[in-house]
Image (tube, rainbow, N blue to C red):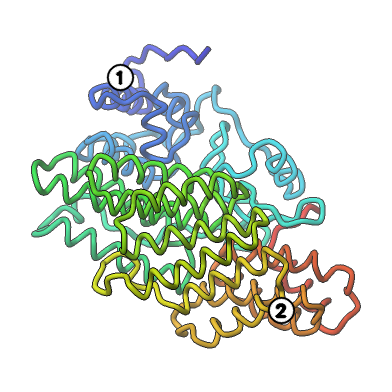
């Protein structure tokens, strides 16, 4: 049974007045605490304590986000500014100083894959942590990450304009938010998702508010764009290792695509869900989603090709080599006949399919062919695709380790470690964890110790 809400008297204190108006605005917008937590990515526990005047928000950015979601028109930040700086009331539960080992071990067993904030209000970030010899992505208090010296893993959002500034003089909100999305995609590949995802989520809140205030064609166009924001947020969350948030954003994107009635958008997001399922260890689900994506796609479209690629990799992870390789052959044939001016899959070419095939070959244990495919892909990759280069390098290193070329694998892996440190990409670090396991029997070979030492420097460790 949930906790009983307090009956607040707004005149009792600035904190009580703040909580009173949070509840009033929430109920006026027909939000439950659960739905508000989902909409703002602020934990249920935090919202309950704020609303019941048991704790004041620590960060103005959270208050502004809440105000935008509840259409407070600046009321909540104004009330927050009036709250006394005195210590919080006795109901506040203080957070003891967390030891890295205690934090990471407890979290990996109790809440692996969950981000945001713990019930005690601690600000959490999902980071790579050494647990029982393997690297796992677990939520850890931000202050612990900062104290460890790995400040890059505790990155906060890129600066976002205030809500009133974003809305002012916006001649075309659709183009405004579309341009923001393009900029964030470009930024992500250079600096990684840890900075970009929080900024994207802030803009997503503004976009949703603008869409709810619009009608007709503008509302429909903004909803379609909001769907693309949700899909991108799911991709970025996956790339920092936050699976729960990734699934949440992608599920919202799929729901919104059905509302818009955009079959192409639905097809694309079904493909993304297939990719996410495969990457998070659910290949049977991935295969079903990929089949659904192909069934939904228009025949002869690039979206059909994308669906077949996801289908092929799911077969590979399931160990169905013949079905996987036949599917890649089908993808190449479909691509040769697909329309060339589609906005969907404009990046799709023969080289992309061959790189995807290399990944599947590695999953099937065909390491020599996989290594050759990745090396070709790395040579052709533009320099601006920094994060993708790291992913390809890590996969290439793992494939070379599979062939027994330990020294080369360690050298390539060391390059990937550098990019992982810059971007914080879970896709790179996850592959490097697998590479480290493959190299463990050859720990005395040239370069292996150097690689393992470098990898250890970019993850948290139990003391």
Of tags 1 and 2, the one toward the viewer is: 2
| Foreground of the two, 428 or 89 | 428
- Mark 2 = which residue? 368
Say which quarter of the image contains residue 314. bottom right
Q: Is residue 46 left or right of residue 220?
A: right
Q: Position of residue 11 (x, y in %)?
A: 30, 19
**Relative vertical location of residue 190 with respect to residue 176 in this rendering, above or below:** below
Q: Callout 2: helix, strand or loop? A: helix
| Foreground of the two, 367 or 17 | 367
| Foreground of the two, 193 or 412 | 412
- Mark 1 = which residue? 10
| Foreground of the two, 279 or 320 | 320
Whether the residues at callouts 1 and 2 have beta carbons within 8 Å, the answer is no
Q: Is residue 261 left or right of residue 31?
A: left
Q: Callout 1: helix, strand or loop? A: helix
Q: Within 10 angstroms of label 1, few (less than 14), some, or many (20 or more) residues?
A: some
Q: Residue furthest bottom?
A: 379
**Relative vertical location of residue 115 with respect to residue 457 in this rendering, above or below:** above
Number of the label disc, if any, that sits on residue 106: none
**Relative vertical location of residue 99 with respect to residue 380 in this rendering, above or below:** above
Q: Earlier in the sequence, mark 1 or mark 2?
A: 1
Q: Is residue 123 left or right of residue 174?
A: right
Q: CA distance from mark 1 to mark 2?
A: 70 Å
Residue drawn at x 54%, y 77% as measured from the top left:
389
Residue drawn at x 28%, y 54% as measured from the top left:
264
Residue drawn at x 18%, y 45% as measured from the top left:
210
Q: Position of residue 304 (x, y in %)?
A: 37, 60
Say which quarter of the image contains residue 84. top left
**Relative vertical location of residue 395 with respect to residue 223 in this rendering, above or below:** below
Q: Position of residue 399 (x, y in %)?
A: 70, 74
Q: How many marks?
A: 2
């Amino acid at each position: 049974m949930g906790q009983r809400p307090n009956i607040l008297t707004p005149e009792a204190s600035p904190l009580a007045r703040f909580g009173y108006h949070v509840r009033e605005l929430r109920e006026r917008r027909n939000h439950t605490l659960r739905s508000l937590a989902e909409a703002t990515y602020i934990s249920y526990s935090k919202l309950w304590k704020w609303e019941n005047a048991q704790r004041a928000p620590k960060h103005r950015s959270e208050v502004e986000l809440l105000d935008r979601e509840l259409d407070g028109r600046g009321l909540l930040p104004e009330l927050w500014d009036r709250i006394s700086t005195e210590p919080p009331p006795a109901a506040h539960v203080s957070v003891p100083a967390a030891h890295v080992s205690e934090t990471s071990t407890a979290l990996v067993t109790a809440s692996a894959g969950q981000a945001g904030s713990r019930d005690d209000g601690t600000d959490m970030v999902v980071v790579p942590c050494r647990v029982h010899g393997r690297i796992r992505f677990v939520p850890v208090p931000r202050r612990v990450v900062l104290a460890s010296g790995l400040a890059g893993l505790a990155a906060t959002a890129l600066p976002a304009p205030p809500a009133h500034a974003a809305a002012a003089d916006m001649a075309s909100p659709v183009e405004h938010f579309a341009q923001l999305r393009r900029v964030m995609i470009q930024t992500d590949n250079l600096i990684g998702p840890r900075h970009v995802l929080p900024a994207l989520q802030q803009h997503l809140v503004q976009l949703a508010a603008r869409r709810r205030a619009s009608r007709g064609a503008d509302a429909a166009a903004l909803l379609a764009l909001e769907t693309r924001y949700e899909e991108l947020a799911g991709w970025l969350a996956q790339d920092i290792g936050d699976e729960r948030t990734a699934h949440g954003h992608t599920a919202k994107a799929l729901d919104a695509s059905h509302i818009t009635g955009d079959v192409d958008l639905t097809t694309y997001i079904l493909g993304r869900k297939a990719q996410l399922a495969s990457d998070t260890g659910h290949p049977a689900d991935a295969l079903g989603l990929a089949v659904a994506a192909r069934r939904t796609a228009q025949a002869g479209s690039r979206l059909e090709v994308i669906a077949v690629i996801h289908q092929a990799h799911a077969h590979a992870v399931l160990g169905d080599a013949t079905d996987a390789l036949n599917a890649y052959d089908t993808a190449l044939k479909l691509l040769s006949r697909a329309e060339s001016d589609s906005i969907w899959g404009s990046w799709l070419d023969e080289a992309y399919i061959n790189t995807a095939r290399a990944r599947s070959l590695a999953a099937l244990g065909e390491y020599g062919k996989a290594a050759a495919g990745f090396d070709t892909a790395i040579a052709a990759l533009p320099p601006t695709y920094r994060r993708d280069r790291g992913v390809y390098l890590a996969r290439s290193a793992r494939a070379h380790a599979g062939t027994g070329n330990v020294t080369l694998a360690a050298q390539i892996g060391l390059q990937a470690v550098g990019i992982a440190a810059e971007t914080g990409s879970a896709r790179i670090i996850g592959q490097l964890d697998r590479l480290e396991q493959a190299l463990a029997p050859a720990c005395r070979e040239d370069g292996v110790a150097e690689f393992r030492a470098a990898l250890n420097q970019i993850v948290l460790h139990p003391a």
